[in-house]
Image: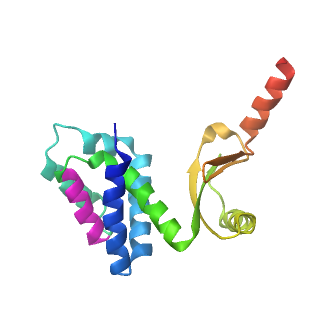
């Protein structure tokens, strides 16, 4: 089982460095891209966490797969590989995001839709959420084709499920008694 405390320590070190070097936004954007790629391609995570793959091969792979990211992230990933913590990449990012959000007063909002939001829809949703929550928000968008339509929003542990799938499930419960 992965330890949140371990992830928090790595994230804290990265966040502190990013603040000192005035590159929080750049590191956040780079790291977000890496995490999305790993989520989109599950074979990458299997490769990184496979015990028979040599550590040097994993570090080389990360450097070649993500050549445009910050050197700080390459160093972090090399340390994670050296310490056998490759599987923590996504958890460390979540912790990093939480630290950044707390420090900058930004609420991280998980938005799940059936298809990718247009720029106009993203802006409207972001503006509406900022008014509702009374502060800045950062949207973390996920696609779930099982939703059929609508949107599912999660912020601060609370879920607002306005998806068509949820409405159909409610209707089914009402009809079946």
Which residue is nearer to you in this view: 43 or 31?
31
Query: Farthest front residue?
Result: 5
- Residue at 34% over, 41% down: 2
Q: Quadrant of the N terminus?
A: top left
Residue 168 to residue 56: above or below: above
- Residue at 80% over, 24% down: 173
Residue 151 rendering spot, x and y as whole percentages:
70, 49
Whether residue 171 sits left or right of residue 130 in the image: it is: right
Which residue is nearer to you in this view: 8 or 159?
8
Residue 59 occupies quadrant: bottom left
The kind of secondary structure the magenta stretch mainly shows is: helix
Extent of the magenta region:
70-81
Whether residue 1 sits left or right of residue 141 in the image: it is: left
Residue 75 to residue 1: above or below: below
Q: Is residue 96 magenta?
A: no
Residue 69 rendering spot, x and y as whole percentages:
33, 68
């Amino acid at each position: 089982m992965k330890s949140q405390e371990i992830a928090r320590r790595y994230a804290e070190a990265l966040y502190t460095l990013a603040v000192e070097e005035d590159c929080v936004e750049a590191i956040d954007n780079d790291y977000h891209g890496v995490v999305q790629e790993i989520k989109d391609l599950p074979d990458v995570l299997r490769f990184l966490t496979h015990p028979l793959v040599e550590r040097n091969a994993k570090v080389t792979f990360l450097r070649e797969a993500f050549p445009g990211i910050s050197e700080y992230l390459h160093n972090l990933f090399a340390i994670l590989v050296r310490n056998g913590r490759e599987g923590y990449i996504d958890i460390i990012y979540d912790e990093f995001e939480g630290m950044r959000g707390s420090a900058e007063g930004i609420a991280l909002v998980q938005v799940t839709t059936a298809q990718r939001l247009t720029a106009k829809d993203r802006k409207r949703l972001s503006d509406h959420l900022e008014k509702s929550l009374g502060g800045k928000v950062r949207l973390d968008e996920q696609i779930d084709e099982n939703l059929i339509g609508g949107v599912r929003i999660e912020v601060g542990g609370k879920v607002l499920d306005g998806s068509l799938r949820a409405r159909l499930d409610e209707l089914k419960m009402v009809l079946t008694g």
